[in-house]
Amino acid sequence: LRKVAVLGVGQCKWGMLADRTVHDMIAEVGNAALRDAGVPRNLIEAVYLGNVTGGELCNQYTMGSVAAHALGIPAVPAHRYEAACCTGAIGFREAYLAVANGVYDFVLVIGVEKLNVGDMDRTVEVISRGFDSWEGRIGLLAPSQYALYATAHMHAYGTTREQLAMVAEKNYYHGSLNPDAHMQKRYTVEDVLAAPMISDPLGRHDCSLVTDGAAAVVIGPLEKAKEYNARPIEVLASAVGAETSTTASRESYVSFGSTRRAVEAAYKQAKLGPEDISFVETHDCFTITEIINIEDLGFVPKGEGGAAVQDGYTRLGGKIPVNVSGGLKAKGHALGATGVGQIYEAVKQLRGEAGERQVPNAEVALTHMLGGAPSISTVHIFARGY
Amino acid sequence: LRKVAVLGVGQCKWGMLADRTVHDMIAEVGNAALRDAGVPRNLIEAVYLGNVTGGELCNQYTMGSVAAHALGIPAVPAHRYEAACCTGAIGFREAYLAVANGVYDFVLVIGVEKLNVGDMDRTVEVISRGFDSWEGRIGLLAPSQYALYATAHMHAYGTTREQLAMVAEKNYYHGSLNPDAHMQKRYTVEDVLAAPMISDPLGRHDCSLVTDGAAAVVIGPLEKAKEYNARPIEVLASAVGAETSTTASRESYVSFGSTRRAVEAAYKQAKLGPEDISFVETHDCFTITEIINIEDLGFVPKGEGGAAVQDGYTRLGGKIPVNVSGGLKAKGHALGATGVGQIYEAVKQLRGEAGERQVPNAEVALTHMLGGAPSISTVHIFARGY
């Protein structure tokens, strides 16, 4: 396998973007990534695009081709990926495999999602179709599923609602330092605990945001990358893991097998372990998810995720900062864009360009997405290639 | 690159399948392909699934994971592809690349689509979102776009409505020999010409069918394939080409640049030319499309596609039989399944298992899909690997 690097990244402001279309978000982030990479666009050989709901909410399938056209490279093969919330990260992984294996040199990966289309009930119903449709009929949608996991974790390990709330408080704080984040406001633990209950024990502030957003990255072989960009970020590992797609048939309700499989493969590929990671972007679709994830990723022993956040271990300035971008909680969850947005954050941090939210001495980044029940996970590890 | 083979194929009866769900179609074709391949399912390392409209029409995103679950291999990574009508073929190509490059050994590729959900107006509107959404607003949907191409072809080369009708008559005839085809009935050229006009010069019988269907194939490295199956079908070429995603910005209205780029790359990879191909499955979304395609694929000079069908050149028993499965016109067009269904047909023909529609002396098969305006094309070439 050839070494692969991220040469350039682009991202728009995330939020409820009433005046934007997927077309113009794609153009903004794609052009920004190309400029940042320094790679002439006529060298781009493929476009890998992640998007979940554009066919339904934006009247546009075939969004890969639409992106290539919008970016002035219409004769470049382009197609779309979907694996629920893992969508953008899966697109990145498939592009990584293509470059690592020499199928293409330079590839543009785009994640885009526009969820706020003036009818939040409809949007929430559409998003829920990322879960098993049979279970959806009996009410096992996102909040109710993750409420079960939260309850199980509380029962098994004594995790508290306060600890869940501390995840939200931390990520709101991080998001307030990120100008691209959907939510700029900070909330206290008391604010989080006082919010209306959505699915017990998860209140409104335990849930991630419904966000419009886009991000793009240009990747290429590390050796060739150096011809165009003096600061390539190397992909040390790219891994995927899977588990059953229904809640009823899960291996565990306090741990995600897809994550464990993906991270084991990623650490093996990178020849690194959790002790080598400087900071993490992980899938905090709900506060409990971040707690389970940091355990499954090996940063703390199983059951100690709640205590870790309580001790400030995962806060900016702590031992292993988690979701310094604000995460899905505060930067926002733009489904197909979120996994690519995590990579944007990893690159900005590793380059030392993350402004107020900069992680000191950021050497190695780990990004982690979950999709579905969760039925699929991706883990990527990055470090400076210069 | 390792040599790659198709080990097994599965397909259900295509049609308006009111009593079926995507879940049970996936289970039928996936299990059939696994049985046919002789590969134990615990050796499958990934599921690549093509589907376009399932999120909207069947309330199910994340269909890759759903498929892995339905087939009893839930811990196998699975995700979904979409590139309009090219969807299933793009999934096959990406799976081919993964196996050829040694990422995986055995991979299951599934194409599935359920379009008939009791509201044909809604279905047709949803399908139209495969084209550029801005052009859709001014009426450039599938029939109106391809009507422009038909008119341009008639103007440039003297192609006639009768010749278009002969494509339909031929493919209906072929479909009547295929027990899995949506349409079993034959229609005469007169029937086709007498049908109601949809978008002049394309009448109702010039348009492909709105079909529910599914197909699956198991692929693996040719050398390992021989351990499990005595009759592997080798993938001699896999190629993709692209062009602009809008009708207004096309390079030509009588030729598709995406096809030309894909087929040039495919012939080069296979070290073959059109004279070496025994039969073709090509994207006859409209009758004019088949005529343009057989020209772009090099089987007849540009402008002579109409005469070729008139002369019986492309009929079963002719020089280069085209769409002996019945094509999109009679086997049916199940969007994300169609490209995988073409490969099912190629494999059955090359093995000599195609029954009444068997092409005599079938040695080399070419399959060709178009997606979007068309903005993307795939070409695959197959031959016996035994």
Image: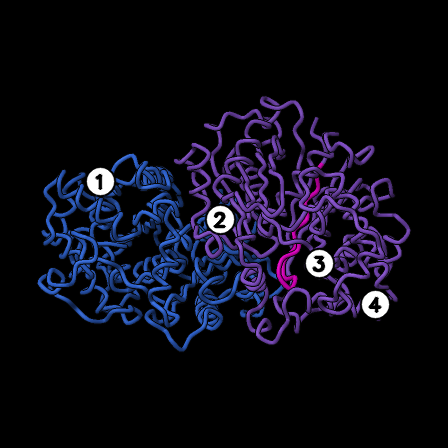
Chain colours: A blue, B purple
Residue B53 in view (yes/no): yes
How crowded is the residue under tag 3: few (<14 C-alpha within 10 Å), some, or many (20+)?
Answer: many
Numbered label attached to residue B207: 3
The percent coordinates of residue A3 (x first, y second) are 46, 47
Q: Secondary structure at mark 2?
A: strand
A338 part of magenta stretch: no
Which residue is under mark 2?
B80
Residue B372 is covered by the magenta coloring: yes
What is the crowding at mark 2: few (fewer than 14 residues within 10 Å), some, or many (at least 20)? many
Give the total number of marks visible in the rendering: 4
Q: State the quadrant of the N terminus of chain B.
A: top right
Question: Could you tell me how far apart the alpha carbons at marks 2 and 1 are, in whole angstroms?
Answer: 27 Å
Tell me the chief SS of the magenta region.
Answer: strand
Question: Separation of disc 4 and disc 1 at Cα?
Answer: 65 Å
Q: Nearer the viewer, residue B156 or A3?
A: B156
Disc 3, SS: loop
Which region of the structure is painted magenta?
Answer: B370-382
Q: Name the chain under label 1.
A: A
Q: What residue sits right under mark 1 in the picture?
A: A254
For the residues labelled 3 and 4, the Cα–Cα distance comes to 17 Å
Q: In this rendering, which labeled residue sits more in front, label 2 or label 4?
A: 4
What subunit carries mark 4?
B
